[in-house]
């Protein structure tokens, strides 16, 4: 593979583009917003600066990595020769369907179309294309340049050749690939989201406070981050979306999202990216404190 396209320049998209470019691939980063693209490139540059400071890469390597990344504000001929496209847009089924229809019409027949979705069915996504054998899930973890796992999700029609190609490619990115099957939430979020939801329910019911819940899980279960803080980093809107996919997919009330989670998303308090979630990030992540009015 020589040319990779990444659709979406947000947290996951720019991290995926950064990682591919760092390992020598030509990357086209695509977003409908020129401003979002510029923010994405700035984020990549800042993260590369951190790698320079930690002596992971040199200053010259940083410049080489940035030079491998080009930008586009639409899915068009600029990605028609791509060998792989990784979609990292909003966790919205209809948006993903629209993107994959467009990719199917623009990309060469041999191109693999991957989704970074954290919960939406790969089989459903593949069904809107004429190449379901070439459609697969490639679920990176945040922050992408640091986290080792890539959850590879086979759709119903994904070919063994496609799976092997993406598995081998993930290893070339110095990642650890794990192949799973196409069920709601796959493995990572089928297990993680009920835990986060239960932590929110415990908070809502007054079992314990934010810091107490997170401390129990960090010190008692050796988690590097408590579930409420992790929810803030993932984005409470994303957590809510995944829980609804699980609830609809399995028809089981145990996946019903906490009313507190629903209210916080409705109010726009969705975590780090909004500056307010279970913690207040108005003074930065390192200075975050427990939000004072999370139960209101």
Image (cartoon, rainbow, N blue to C red):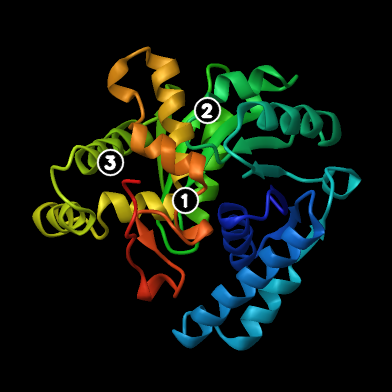
Name the one closer to the observer, 278 or 225.
278
Distance, label 3 to label 2, CA atoms, is: 23 Å
Farthest residue to the left: give it: 220
Q: Position of residue 167 (x, y in %)?
A: 49, 42
For disc 1, the marked residue is 269
Q: Residue at x 34, y 54 (%)?
A: 293
Q: Position of residue 228 (x, y in %)?
A: 30, 51
Residue 98 vertical position relative to residue 279 in the rendered view, above or below = above
Distance, label 3 to label 1, CA atoms, is: 14 Å
Q: Earlier in the sequence, mark 3 or mark 1?
A: 3
Q: Residue at x 48, y 62 (%)?
A: 275
Q: Nearer the viewer, mark 3 or mark 1?
A: 1
Disc 1, SS = loop
Residue 55 vertical position relative to residue 258 in the rendered view, above or below = below
Q: Nearer the viewer, mark 1 or mark 2?
A: 1
Q: Position of residue 72 (x, y in %)?
A: 83, 55
Disc 2, SS = loop
Q: Quadrant of residue 58?
A: bottom right
Residue 119 is marked as none
Q: Earlier in the sequence, mark 3 or mark 2?
A: 2
Residue 120 is marked as 2
Residue 200 is marked as 3
């Amino acid at each position: 593979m020589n040319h990779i396209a990444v659709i979406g320049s947000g947290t996951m998209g720019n991290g995926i583009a950064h990682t591919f470019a760092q390992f020598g691939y030509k990357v086209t980063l695509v977003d409908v917003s020129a401003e979002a693209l510029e923010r994405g490139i700035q984020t990549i540059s800042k993260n590369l600066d951190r790698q320079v400071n930690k002596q992971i890469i040199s200053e010259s390597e940083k410049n080489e990595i940035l030079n491998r990344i080009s930008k586009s504000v639409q899915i068009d001929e600029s990605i028609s020769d791509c060998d792989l496209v990784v979609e990292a847009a909003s966790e919205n089924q209809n948006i993903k369907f629209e993107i994959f229809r467009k990719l199917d019409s623009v990309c060469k027949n041999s191109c693999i179309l991957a989704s970074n979705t954290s919960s939406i069915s790969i089989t459903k996504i593949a069904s809107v294309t004429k190449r379901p054998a070439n459609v697969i899930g490639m679920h990176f973890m945040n922050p992408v340049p640091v986290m080792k796992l890539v959850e590879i999700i086979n759709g119903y029609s994904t070919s063994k050749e496609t799976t092997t190609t993406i598995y081998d490619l993930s290893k070339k990115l110095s990642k650890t690939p794990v192949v799973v099957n196409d069920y709601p939430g796959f493995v990572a979020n089928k297990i993680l989201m009920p835990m986060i939801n239960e932590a929110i329910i415990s908070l809502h019911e007054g079992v314990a406070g934010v810091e107490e819940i997170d401390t129990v899980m960090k010190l008692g279960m050796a988690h590097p981050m408590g579930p409420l803080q992790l929810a803030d980093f993932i984005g409470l809107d994303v957590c809510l979306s995944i829980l609804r996919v699980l609830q609809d997919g399995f028809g089981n009330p145990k996946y019903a999202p906490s009313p507190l989670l629903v209210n916080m998303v409705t109010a726009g308090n969705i975590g780090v990216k909004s500056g307010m979630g279970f913690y207040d990030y108005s003074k930065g992540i390192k200075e975050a404190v427990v939000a004072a009015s999370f139960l209101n």
